[in-house]
Amino acid sequence: MSAVPRLMLKTDANPEGLPIDVFDSLRAALAANRAQFLLDLPSGPFYGFNRERATVQQGVIQNCQGMMGSAKAHYEGIKAFSETDQTEDLKAISVPTLVLHGEDDQIVPIADAALKSIKR
């Protein structure tokens, strides 16, 4: 199982979450220039190429498959990713489950996703 966040958005039930402004700015950048957004995201936080000792790999960045997807799906996907509360889904898992998550994930921080998912 991937380290799906139970909820990324800051709410009363998730006070550690991110403010809606963060997700609104992602949607605005996507709507303004989807091609640039889909270069900027893999160039930086998505693959960690913005880290000090990272070896930037242009082939990986350019291989981002984002432009093959629907612009509407990308836009709506930000909402689904950030605002869907998956707490009840996580509670429904009744078998031992391996949760894998990188500790330096800049898109979905480990503390907000995997560690909370494991507790659920």
Image (tube, rainbow, N blue to C red):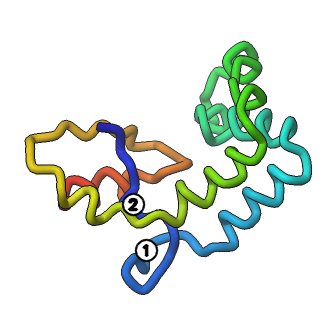
Q: Position of residue 48 (x, y in %)?
A: 59, 35
Kindly indicate the quadrant of the structure image that contains residue 27.
bottom right
Residue at 69%, 17% (x, y): give it: 57
Lateral position of residue 73 relative to residue 109, left or right: right
**Rendered residue at 48%/44% (across/down):** 105
Is 19 located above or below residue 88 in the figure? below
In the figure, 7 relative to 99: above or below?
Answer: below
Front residue of this view, candidates 91 and 44: 91
Q: Which disc, if any, is residue 16?
A: 1
- Label 2's element? helix
Neighbours of disc 1 within 10 Å: few (<14), some (14-19), many (20+): some
Question: x and y percent of residue 70 in the render?
Answer: 74, 37
Q: Earlier in the sequence, mark 1 or mark 2?
A: 1
Q: Which mark is residue 103?
A: none
**Cα gap from disc 1 to disc 2, whole angstroms:** 7 Å
Task: Identify the element where label 1 is drawn.
Answer: loop
Q: Which residue is most to the left? A: 95
Residue furthest right in the image:
32
Residue under circle 2? 112
Q: Going by the image, does 84 lie left or right of 29?
A: left
Give the side of residue 3 with respect to residue 74, left or right: left
Residue furthest out toward the top: 59
What amino acid is labelled 2 in the image? Asp
Disc 1 marks a residue whose amino acid type is: Glu
Quadrant assignment, res 22: bottom right
At a point 69% along the width and 45% down the height, the residue shown is: 74
Please state the horizontal and vertical placement of residue 87, each as a whole percent of the image.
30, 65
47 shown above or below 81: above
- Write the residue at 19% across / 37% down: 98
The answer to whether mark 1 and mark 2 are in CB contact below 8 A is yes
For residue 117, which quarter of the picture? bottom left
